[in-house]
Amino acid sequence: MRLFKRLILPYLIIFSAFSSYASTPGGLKFHGSEQPINQRTSYDVFGKEDVEFSDSFDIAFQTFLFSTSEFGYILRIKNSESNTIYNLFYDGQGDNLKFKFNEEGNDHLIAVELERSELPSTQWFMMKISFDLKKNTITLSINDKDYTASDLDLPDTYHPIILFGKSDYIIDVPSFAMKTLSVSNADEAYQFPLKENEGSDVHDIDGDVVGYVSNPEWLMNDAYHWRNKTSFRSQSVAGANYNPRTQEVYYFNRDSLHVYNVWTGISRTEVFKNSCPINLLLGTNFIDPDANKLYAYEVYYENQDSLPTMASLDLSTYEWSEGIHQQLPTQLHHHGQFFDTKKDEFIIFGGFGNMHYSKDFFTYQLNDSIWRKSESFSGDRISPRYFSSVGYLESNNSLYVFGGMGNESGEQTVGRKYYYDLHKVDLDKKQVTKLWEIPWTEDNVIPVRGMVIPNDSSFYTLCYPEHFTESFLKLYKFSLKDGSYEILGDSIPIYSDKITTNANLYYDNNLKNFYALVQEFDNNDISSELEVYSLASPPITMEQLKNYSKQPKSYTSWLIFISFVLMIAIAYLILRWLASNSSKNEAAQAALTNQPEIPLQPNSIYLFGGFTARNKNNKDITYLFSAQLKQIFCLILQYSTTENGITSQRLSNILWPDKPADKVKNSRGVTIKNLRKTLTELNGIELIYDKGYFKIVYTDEFYCDYTRCLELIADGEVETHREEFIGIVTRGKFLQLSNDPIFDSLKHKTEKKLEPVLLLEIEKAFETEDYSQTIALTNALFNIDPLNEDALNYHVKALQRLKMNDEAKIRYQAFVIEYKKIMGTDYPHPYKV
């Protein structure tokens, strides 16, 4: 029991806080050196309260760096009974990120230098400072990596005064945010969700005021108030879209493209090399993220049969390519749409034109460049309509069509009705199922085109009463099961007089933000203005925003109790598993851990797991590859394996999109020179420039796990070389620590090739009763899809066949927790013996 109390309880305390709040909105943003000194943020955690810890204590919190180019002090730790002060300093200048934990006025105790790719700039990460008063050590943990200072002179008891941001004469503060703060040891814990929305008082998890903050910016407000991020205007017809791969908003007309990066807040304008070939009437468009292209289309022209109706814009070169001239039978205002990245096809539904409402699905195939009217779907009928919201759920390969306006006949002269129904369109079975239709007692509303489906239980869309000139968009969350709904967040103004005016909803899973694009056309139906808004996820109601601090203590205590009981159960299973040393499991354990591993060989670069390079003498030279050298190497290697290489223009547009041409040329030349110099450390590999293309060429003397993996798949030799294949994919997730959007395309294409191969090899390994290989392969598949149910079933069954039932239960429980965290709902399938 003593072991449990000392080793397990601190983690339970931290887990209970983070499991309840880490996935919820909230947090405290610190105004740093970008503001005058008197407007910078300061947070005194305990305020006037005197707290005491014996033996040890941890300060744990999640943080978010808003600018990776600033520097300053994140926090200071004083002891009310001594003069020693510790501080944590951050320096984001230069190529790497630096953290220094110091004894103030004396010396550095811990110095950490991380590559920028190790701390994704668009995500929260964990920080913890652990004081072991018995062992006289302090450990700084950053993103689950520990760095320790030893042989310190620490007291047996500590009365910490914890100050974040500006403090006394310490005025250099970076722009950062924090949430889910916990100060604890084995005996007691202070937890601060930091979910206030106003004022300077800070409440603990029970709602009591503990500590105070000056000049706060409470991020809880970002989950209720839509923030207007930017706006653009075009004098000619324009279209708008959002690209989650690059986190950019696009607003384009025939001549140019306005780009706004929602993460950096930077806008730029790109002038096209050639004008858009189609005559933009509505500005309808879609994005192919894999090909990095934007497609503009018009389904119908009045008496203009000779004009192209489809054109694609290369987002690397900003050059338009003319597409088909095929038209659909009529104009289709406000149709729903979806782009299937797996099949490279674009689907539209419904719409209004020529005094008719449409009930048809049309599909545009990118491969053969043609519109086709989809074959009739069996099942329920969707009545003709426009202003419908369309979304896609990958887990069942189905489209969902919600609401709209129209009538059963499709004739406008009959009149229109508002629909509040939901249809599921199974793309595999070609079947339509009407899931529900709900009564509506409020003002009639129509949804926007975009629908966000985060899981299999609910969906989000924006709705507004379009029959008012000065109207308001509101975010609705509907249940997929029965249509019950709630309205979240405040409203967005929209002037809805013109039929061309439109709005759309997007969701960025990395930034955990909703984005609304509102495009209002002027009276001439030509010029328009685009407004961009953001809302943090999960969104909340006004009641939730205002009533956080008034929450009854019994409620939060009950939540903690439930989390605590759950963790006790999981901890019991873990301890039981660790204690099981019986002879019947020894062989199974040996089989489980005896997985093939590729020995690191000379002249090699590994992309699975952490990026690793070994020179001709088998020395680790990974340190020679800066973050930018890794980027350019992987980009050129990617295009070298699929195409003739990459042009200098395309390379420049990807890596230096915001730099002027003269500076880009210099940066490109320096980077290419440094990469060539670094590659001279290896034999059998060379970077060449041939016929306008940069290309990586290599011989059999050079080894790369990525190219070898592609060879095994392409040659159909995975089963023959299964142990080698397993050694590659079990080294870790592909480009594991490289979270820059530049790598997204390479990651997606590689994992798209790997996933079906892994599933097939898992089945073969299980059928041949090679359960250790089954487990290794399922672990590799979890790296691609952590919620893959086939991988879970084979993994659990393999462990059960190895008589490792406790391990099987633990793996199942871990999957259930991850499923709940990502999907927001309970995993529907029970554990089976």
Image (cartoon, rainbow, N blue to C red):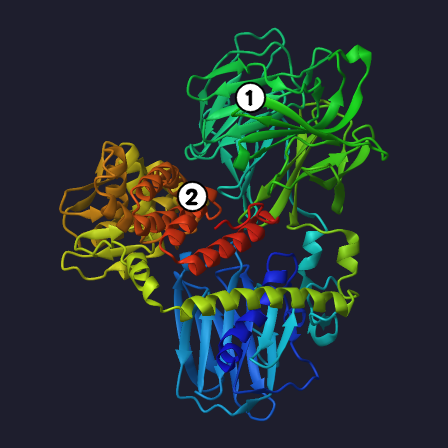
Residue visible at 80% across and 21% down in the picture: 417
Q: Does residue 794 appear left or right of residue 823 in this picture? A: left
- Residue corresponding to mark 1: 430
Q: Observer-nearest residue: 412 or 184? A: 184
In this rendering, does residue 237 appear at all?
Answer: no
x, y percent for residue 605: 24, 51
For badge 1, the amino acid type reads Lys
For badge 2, the amino acid type reads Asp
Question: In the rendering, which numbered label is found on residue 744?
Answer: 2
Please identify, in this view, whether the residue under mark 2 or under mark 1 is nearer the observer.
1
Label 2: element kind: helix
Q: In the displayed structure, would residue 293 be above or below residue 454?
A: above
In terms of sequence position, does the residue under pointer 2 or pointer 1 come before the other? 1
State how far apart marks 2 and 1 are (Cα): 31 Å
Q: Observer-nearest residue: 425 or 278? A: 425
Residue visible at 45% across and 26% down in the picture: 344
Residue visible at 50% across and 52% down in the picture: 815
For disc 1, the neighbor class at 10 Å (few under 14, some 14 to 19, many from 20) is some
x, y percent for residue 463: 74, 35
x, y percent for residue 550: 79, 65
